[in-house]
Image (cartoon, rainbow, N blue to C red):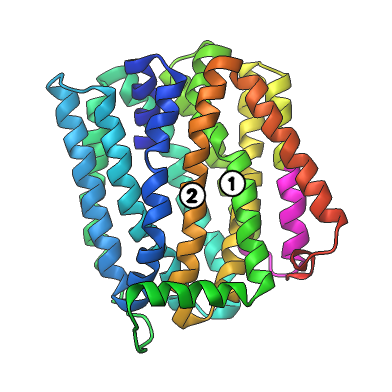
Amino acid sequence: MAFVAQGYLAYDLSDSASVLGLIYGAQALPMLLFPLFAGVAADRFGRRTIIQIGQVMTASIALLIAISIYTDLIVWQHLLVMGVIHGIVMAFSLTARQAAIPDLVPKADLENAVALNGALLSITTAAAPGIGGALYALAGPWVVFALVACLGLISVALSGKLPSLTPPKQSHPAVVQEIIVGLKHINNFPSLKIVILMSLITASLIMPFRFVLPVFVVDVYQKGPAALGLMMTLMGVGAFLGSLILAIKRDGNRGILLLLISGLSGVVLMVIVLIPNYAVGLLLIAILGITDAGRRIPIQGLIMKLSEPEYRGRIMSVYMMTFGIVNLMVLPVGFATEHLGGQWVIGFMALLLILISISLTLSKNPLKSLQ
């Protein structure tokens, strides 16, 4: 809900794709600077506590934005500050969340648990954007952010039911030295490196489309916030279906699946660009949601399987850094979209993704042998 409201409000206040990219890109710097420190924290302290602190911070940010909108003091710079703080919070809380999953389920069920978790999250991804878009249109954006704040506080109470999720006891050198040890550990495992690299490549070429989707809805499809919410809802429905399929699937080559799904994502994006019709776009964005689950879940599962427990927080922190790089990608993508048009920019990225996927599928690399 916040994602829909933030994007549409930013574009509504500024009427600029560059500002929209700047606001989402404001999360990039914290997500690049802080995840390595967040990984050390996740390997030292109770992960439940880190998660709850993040939930409180997220709720507080949403409440402040709601108040500024209600009092008519909101400017797009407020959303920029929100992006920076949100980036810091996500660096720590997402790293702790990812590191905690293997502590909750047996290793044999890990990838299915990741997929099931993704399916449950996809339910809210499917329902919330439509609700957020409708609330934005009917009651205004301040209602959306106020509701987000309330749900955030409820989540703090719910996560209190979790165990403390304390990491394995070990000696801890200085923070910087501990970061270096974690990076060396990743460097010693080629399979782990290529999975993280593949995550960076695919996310950088696919995810920016979500950030500039408000531009597509307004400028290409000539629609409003409710239409944006519906598109986000259908993407969530697709992700839910893709997650359910992976939740019950146990056999198969995950590496090959990842390459094929990445190429298919590029094809779907290309068709969205070539056929600028809203009805067609609704169908294609649902398919894009399916491919998103098919790309994201194998990556997360493989990284968790390949990670040693004592290094898991730091390894997941490197994975989290890819989200910061993706947010950074939104800056040039937003600028290029404003000056060249979204269809040209997304079309180029889709073509690049297709070519990279084909190249990796035909070449010899450790990814193809990962189960």
9 displayed left or right of 250: left
The residue under the point 23% across, 59% down is 53
**x%, y% of residue 50?**
28, 65
* Residues packed near mark 2 inside 10 Å, few (<14), some (14 to 19) or many (20 plus): many
Q: Main secondary structure of the magenta part?
A: helix
Nearer the observer, 369 or 236: 369
Residue 5 seen anywhere in this rendered image of the structure: yes
**x%, y% of residue 177?**
40, 77
* Secondary structure category for the residue under label 2: helix
Residue stretch in magenta: 247-264
* Secondary structure category for the residue under label 1: helix
Identify the image quadrant of the C terminus.
bottom right
The outermost residue toward the right is: 362
The residue under the point 71% across, 56% down is 258
Kindly report the distance in space between the C-alpha atoms of the residues bearing marks 1 and 2.
8 Å
The residue that disc 2 covers is 323
The quarter of the displayed image where residue 85 is located = top left
For residue 263: magenta? yes
Query: Is 162 above or below relative to 337?
Result: below
Three-letter residue code for mark 1? Ala
The residue that disc 1 covers is 203
Query: Is 281 above or below relative to 98?
Result: above
20 displayed left or right of 77: right
